[in-house]
Image (cartoon, rainbow, N blue to C red):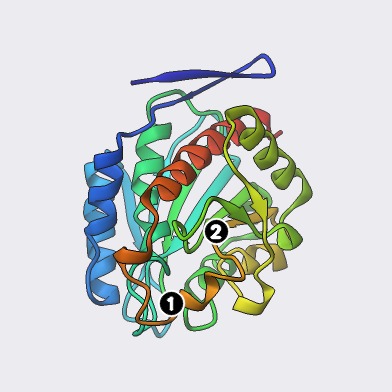
Amino acid sequence: MLLLFAWQQVQLQFTPLERPVIQARLRQRGDDDAKREAALKVLFRESGCKDLSEQPVKRQKVPNLVCVLPGEVPEQIVVGSHFDFSSRGHVLDNWSGASLLPSLYESLNSGQRHHTFVFVGFTDEESRQIGSESYVKNLTSQQAGAVRAMVNLDTLGLAPTKVWAGHADPRLLQLLTSAANSTGSPLQGVNTDSAGRTDSEPFRNAHIPAITIHSLTADTWRVVHRTDDTMKVLRFDDYYATYRLVAVYLALLDAKLE
């Protein structure tokens, strides 16, 4: 069902997917990085992605996976999430983020987009963000200048939606806060410096506006990279609410970013 969401006299178009679809995609993970990339490729094709490609990463066996949703202009909004995982973690870090990429593509594909959206499943985040570093390094200066925003999804569903506020571009953070307030969605700023780096950092270092959405708190971050990282600890109501908020947020970025 196509929703027309009015936000300060701006009409946002997107199609929210039903809970069973999101839950089924969350369960379609593989048990190694290559199988996860293959599973993500299947989900993108199921979601209707027609411009799907693999981007080789130097000295890595598994590539980045890139799906492009064309817009009216070449300026881009990149939505990224890594699909690789620690040998001791399986679901939240970070199939919870990666499996949402095809659903967000499908939600945004229901209406005409102004910006070009690029959805990227990054390889090897656990090895010093190798996949996202490679992606940024492969951008020409002109291509980097055309990226208006990078939205990173990492470790979702442990709690209501959080944002790494201390590392967020101020404009992107303002619009995320507005989207949360307008939809009545819970949102809290929780900085995750102690938990390490994530795939938004190479973009920030290249002076590209970036933001990371997550679900970590002082009480839940201990799940990361441990055998506790299973479907049993994922709170699906919070996870689905994060998906809905991110879908609204991306539609809002499309409408409001210059």
Q: Give the Cα separation between the discs numbered 1 and 2.
A: 18 Å
Quadrant (top left/top right/bottom left/bottom right) for the N terminus: top left
Residue shown at 24% from the left, 46% from the top: 45
Label annotation for residue 192 = none
Q: Which of marks 1 and 2 is nearer the N terminus?
A: 1
Q: Where is residue 189 in the image (x, y as percent from the top left)?
A: 69, 55
Residue shown at 54% from the left, 82% from the top: 128
Residue bearing the label numbered 1: 124
Q: Position of residue 2 (x, y in %)?
A: 38, 20
Front residue of 247/235: it is 235
Q: Is residue 248 left or right of residue 182?
A: left
Label 1 crowd bin: few (<14), some (14–19), many (20+), radius 10 Å: many
Residue 221 lies, with reference to residue 112, above or below; the image says: below
Label annotation for residue 214 = 2
Residue 88 lies, with reference to residue 245, above or below; the image says: below
Residue shown at 75% from the left, 62% from the top: 166
Front residue of 97/61: it is 97
Residue 191 lies, with reference to residue 116, above or below; the image says: below
Q: Is residue 102 left or right of residue 253?
A: left
* Furthest residue toward front: 219
Residue 65 lies, with reference to residue 131, above or below; the image says: above
Let me know if residue 214 appears in the view.
yes
Identify the amino acid type marked 1.
Asp
Please tell me in which quadrant of the rendered image residue 89 appears: bottom left
Identify the amino acid type marked 2.
His
Q: Determine the secondary structure under disc 2.
A: strand
Residue shown at 22% from the left, 69% from the top: 30
